[in-house]
Every structure is written in structure tokens, then in C-alpha cells.
Image (cartoon, helix red, strand yellow):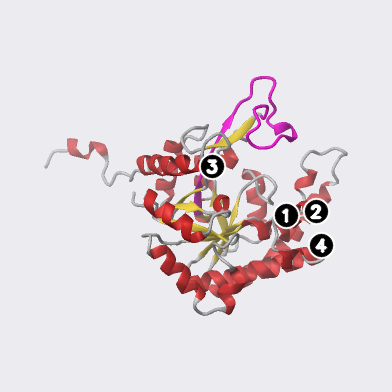
Amino acid sequence: MGRPVTLFTGQWADLPLAELAAKAGGWGFDGLELACSGDHFDVLTALSDARYCGGRRELLERHGLGCWAISEHLVGQAVCDPIDPRHRAILPADVWGDGDPDGVRARAAERLKDTARAAARLGVTTVTGFTGSPVWHLLYSFPPNDFADIDRGYERFAEAFAPIIDVFDAEGVRFCLEVHPTEIAYDFVTTRRALAAIDRREGFGINLDPSHLAHQFLDPAAFAEEFADRIYHVHVKDARRRLDGRRSILASHLPFGDAERGWDFVSPGRGDVDFEAFVRALNRIGYGGPLSIEWEDSGMDREWGAPDALGFVRRIDFAPSAVAFDAAFARDR
């Protein structure tokens, strides 16, 4: 198919970008999806230093790498979330500030706007990320929910993101929500609702990661086809369910990698995602953008797993047929 295969750098933010780029180039990746964390891409420096974005590009190009998207997942999470001490660990110090929840959300929204401006300076038109959610904590309706609170949660999401998407539109950049538990959209129903809440604005789309649907027993290929006009970016990741009557799909408050969990993320091709069906669906909807490997597998060394995942993606990214297979049967008349 020729879609570029990139490596999402969020799980590698402990490595300097220069070191990671050398590894990724040596493994054969086409590019990196740069996380706005570690030293990989600094939004404020991109806006204050006219040479910074060119320097990032030059660093990547030395290793034969491109960049089609940057990620602002961590800051995005704080835009709509109820803020608690866990957020301090994932946010820049100046976004966290004094920790006052309203202030944190406001500063996160402003940083996300700046991310759109920085992306434009880097020359990319896609920012992947999270939104957070005012209603995720109401997932299990006990004590019983007042469903007017759910309605209001989607209104609050739209109120927070409308001015953010105004900036994205002005910069010619699109925001791609990674549909994911803990976000305003995590399945078919909530994705429909989130898109409707924001009036299906073109500047707000989807970063489709099939692993987040697979462990919910949802069909990533069907998701791609239903939301075809909003699939702006794709992550490649896998998940494996281990439900044996003792392990729970709710993961039992256990960390990733614990053997007692009912599901876990695994390297692509080693879980429950039907990647052939997924690629066929991407072909049907005409998706030609990056396939960005978000490598997560607590049971596998990442420097063995990332190039192995790259090889898997190269093998399964087949092009659609340009002709009907039975066309050769027709005789000239």
C-alpha cells in the first residue's frame, strides 16, 4: 500500500530524540510521531525559537525519517478531566501550576492551542491526543446517574474544545482524538455523541487505535467504516483478552502486565485484533496516512519488539486490488 510506518515516541520519552531517531532509522521506520514530552518536541520552544522546528526536521532527516503527526496526549487529558493528584505526574509544571482544577484545565486548553501553532511551524497537519472526560467517572451507574449530568458533560466537552478547534482550523491543523477508555469517546455510541456535540467540525477527527476497541469486544474494522470521514490518523497496537472465569475485563485495579488482569496490551500481531480485516477496512475507506506503531507490551523487550512490530506491519499493509479478479475471464467481443 505504501503507507508510511512510523513509531510513536511517547513510550520512549526516557530516551533523547537523537538516540531514538538513530534506533528507529536503523530499524527501518519511515518516521516518528513525535510526542510533546521528554525532549522529543517542545511546544513552547517551537513557538519562541525560529530555528527549533528546522532543527527537529534535520535531526530526523539525518536518519531517513519523516514526521506526519505530533502527539499531545498528556496535556489533552487535562482539558476535560476532573483534576486530581495523578495529573501532576503527567503534566508540564507550568500547566499544573498550583493544581487548582479550573486553572489546570484552562492552562491545558491554552497549551493545546499552542500545540496547533507549533505543529504548523513544524509543517505537520495532524495532532493526536486525548480530551479527558467530565463523565468517565460515571461509567458504572451506581449510585444511579442523573443522566442530565451526562448530557451536561458532553456540553462541557464541546464548550472546552470549540475554541481549541477554532485555533486548529486557523492553523490548518486537525486534532485527532484517540478513542479510548477515559476519554469523551471510547466506543461507537460515545464517538457518535462526541462528534455530534462538536457539530462534526472537520477540525476534530479520530486517531484510530484498534487495541482500545478489541478489549471491549468491539470491531475496529466496523469502526473505521462507520467513521470513515473522521479517520485522520491510525495507531497500530494490539490487545489480548485472558478471560478464563477468574480474570476480569475490568482489570481488577491491577497494573499493566500483571498476570491476574483479564486483558493487556501486546505487540502487534500477538493479540486479538484482526489486522487483515482492519487493513481491508482502511483500504475501503481510502485511508492513506501513516500507520503509527504505539508499542506497548509489558512482557517483551521494547528494542526487540519495535522492529518486530515494524516487520509485521510491513507484511500486512497490502494494497487493494486495482481490478476485479474475474475480469480476466471476460472474452473480447
Circle 1 residue: 89
Pointers 1 and 3 in contact (C-beta within 8 Å): no
At horizontal 86% and vertical 46% (from top left) the residue drawn is: 146
Mark number displayed over residue 99: 4
Pick the residue in front: 14 or 150: 14
* Nearest-to-viewer mark from 2 and 3: 2
Q: Earlier in the sequence, mark 4 or mark 1?
A: 1
Circle 2 residue: 85
Label 4 environment density (alpha carbons within 10 Å; few <14, some 14–19, many ≥20): some
At horizontal 53% and vertical 59% (from top left) the residue drawn is: 16
Residue 44 magenta-highlighted: no
Tell whether 244 sits left or right of 278: right
Determine the CA span between mark 1 and mark 3: 27 Å
* Nearest-to-viewer mark from 1 and 3: 1
Determine the CA span between mark 4 and mark 1: 11 Å
Label 2 environment density (alpha carbons within 10 Å; few <14, some 14–19, many ≥20): few
Name the chief secondary structure element in magenta.
Answer: loop
Question: Quick check: can you spot residue 105?
Answer: yes
Determine the CA span between mark 2 and mark 3: 29 Å
Circle 3 residue: 210
Element assignment for label 3: loop
Question: Tag 2: residue type?
Answer: Pro
Q: Which image quadrant is residue 290 in?
A: bottom left
Q: Earlier in the sequence, mark 4 or mark 2?
A: 2
Q: Earlier in the sequence, mark 2 or mark 3?
A: 2
- Residue 163 coordinates in the image, percent (x, y): 68, 70
Determine the CA span between mark 4 and mark 3: 34 Å
At horizontal 63% and vertical 50% (from top left) the residue drawn is: 192
Pointers 4 and 2 in contact (C-beta within 8 Å): yes
Question: Tag 4: residue type?
Answer: Gly
Pointers 2 and 1 in contact (C-beta within 8 Å): yes
